[in-house]
Amino acid sequence: MTVLKARFEIRRWVAVTAVTIALIGGGLIASVVGGKRSTVPIFVATAQAAGEPGQFVSFAPIVKKSAPSVVNISSTKVIKAASNLQQRNRRGQQQQQQNPFLDDPFFRQFFGEGPFNTVPRDRRESALGSGVIVSPDGYILTNNHVVEGATSVKVTLSDRREFTAKTIGTDPQSDLAVIKIDASNLTALPLSGVKPEVGDICLAIGNPFGVGQTVTMGIVGATGRNLGGSIEAFEDFIQTDASINPGNSGGALISTRGELIGINTAILSGSGGNQGIGFAIPVAMARNIMDQLIKSGKVTRGYLGAYLQDVDPNLAKAFKIPNNSGVVITKVDPKTPADKAGVKEGDVVTQVNGDTVVDTQSLRNRIASMSPGSDVKLHLYRNGAPSDVTVTLGERPAELDARSSRQGRGGDRDSGQASGLEGVSVEDVTADVARQLNLGRDATGVVVTDVEESSVAADAGLQRGDVIEQVNRQPVKNAAEFDKMVRAGKGGTTLLLVNRGGVRNYVAIESK
């Protein structure tokens, strides 16, 4: 009985399925024969962006409209022989040491006079990239690294016309540049006024590997992405999985409305090719820099004159602020806009002109985007109490934009005495210690000589070689004073101001 019932159920299921398929098939046939289009949309959101509801998605109309605005750029740079001569001589010395026969006159008649007596020659380097036409009269936005130091820049349009371009201005700190060709009535790509959101579909247009103009598709994977200055000094990237490869640099990242939302700049890759993580400079940042380069050939940025550090949960607790967002002022340079306005070391900035400050990079970008002379209102916490300070910004000094490697912490040290801070050993900052750690003559505090790996201090980020200048917002002069101050604050959070390679940061250590 059970078997028969099962067979019946199977037959009934097959019959119902067949009827359903027939009804759907009949409906589709009726739709085609009757010349009527189905009103059931396929991929509704993207279909509405690309065409009428119910059609399969195609971005061809958008690409046809946008592609003529993206150009191929080839740049040439001449490396002068004089700059390579010393390096060539070093190689020559190594070769002679490895091959003493090069000194033998018999062998010289076959192999010449060797690397020392060769006439140095200029070396020519070429680079390929992309650019975006931003005005009908020939202004083109691209990456600085595509044209940096170039002696010749050639632009090829989508219709294969070629032009020699002139560099209008470059900004290495954002990796943007503006060049111009002598042409008119060009198709300029409109700049988007809408901030992209995570999940938006986007298209990347460029010249990957020099194969010719190529379009790839992806989504916006993240916005406001910064990599700690590892790519550029000012980072606020759009992250996308649209395929970006060498040669795409300076090309367009566009929305499904056919508007420019970013300039493709970099990829995160272990192989040199696309691995699904690409970065584009958002058009909001690019527009400000582009306008300045076209107007004056250079970029000026607002300047505060303070050193910054992100707020983490431990610091938020130590500074008695209501949430974990904001930026701590770790140092204020004298006679700077911040100093003149009364901003103090230890202040925590949580808002700029009413907008929330998320982290250090967002505050730096916001200040830099403002013009020197602008007034900016900072909402901050000082000793746990809210306060507002208005700062008139200065102009960011050019020397701050020069990239320099941070100095190391200095020599191997295993001396020092155990302190009141569990798992940490310190010693006085003497003249000898200050010299080894490249500190100033007036440096004070204690240097960390050892941090146990299993200690709370190590978990908080304290490192060997750090110079502790303050304990709980009070200056410390020597190891004995440090020990006394730490023990006096037992049972809560110990807040340290640490100098690491010339950069000051706060470290909050919770007692067990």
Image: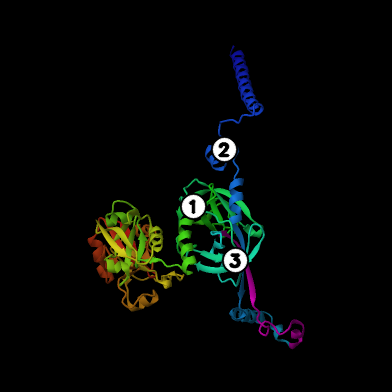
Q: Quadrant of residue 362?
A: bottom left
Q: Position of residue 465 (x, y in %)?
A: 38, 68
Which of marks 2 and 1 precedes in the sequence?
2
Q: Secondary structure at mark 2?
A: loop
Q: Residue at x 49, y 54 (%)?
A: 238
Which of marks 3 and 2 precedes in the sequence?
2
The answer to whether mark 1 and mark 2 are in CB contact below 8 A is no
Please name the residue that numbered disc 2 is placed on.
52
Going by the numbered disc 2, the residue's amino acid type is Glu
Going by the numbered disc 1, the residue's amino acid type is Ser
Which of marks 1 and 3 precedes in the sequence?
3
Q: Residue at x 31, y 77 (%)?
A: 442
User: Can residue 271 be spotted in the picture?
Assistant: no
* Magenta stretch: includes residue 115: yes
The quadrant in which the N terminus is found is top right
Q: Which mark is residue 182?
A: 3
- Cα distance in 3D space between marks 1 and 2: 23 Å
In the picture, measured across the screen, residue 230 lies left or right of residue 86, that is: left
In the picture, measured across the screen, residue 96 lies left or right of residue 291, that is: right
Please name the residue that numbered disc 1 is placed on.
192
Q: Position of residue 121 (x, y in %)?
A: 66, 79
Q: Please state which of residues 506 and 31 is positioned toward the viewer in this rendering.
A: 31
Highlighted range, magenta = 105-132
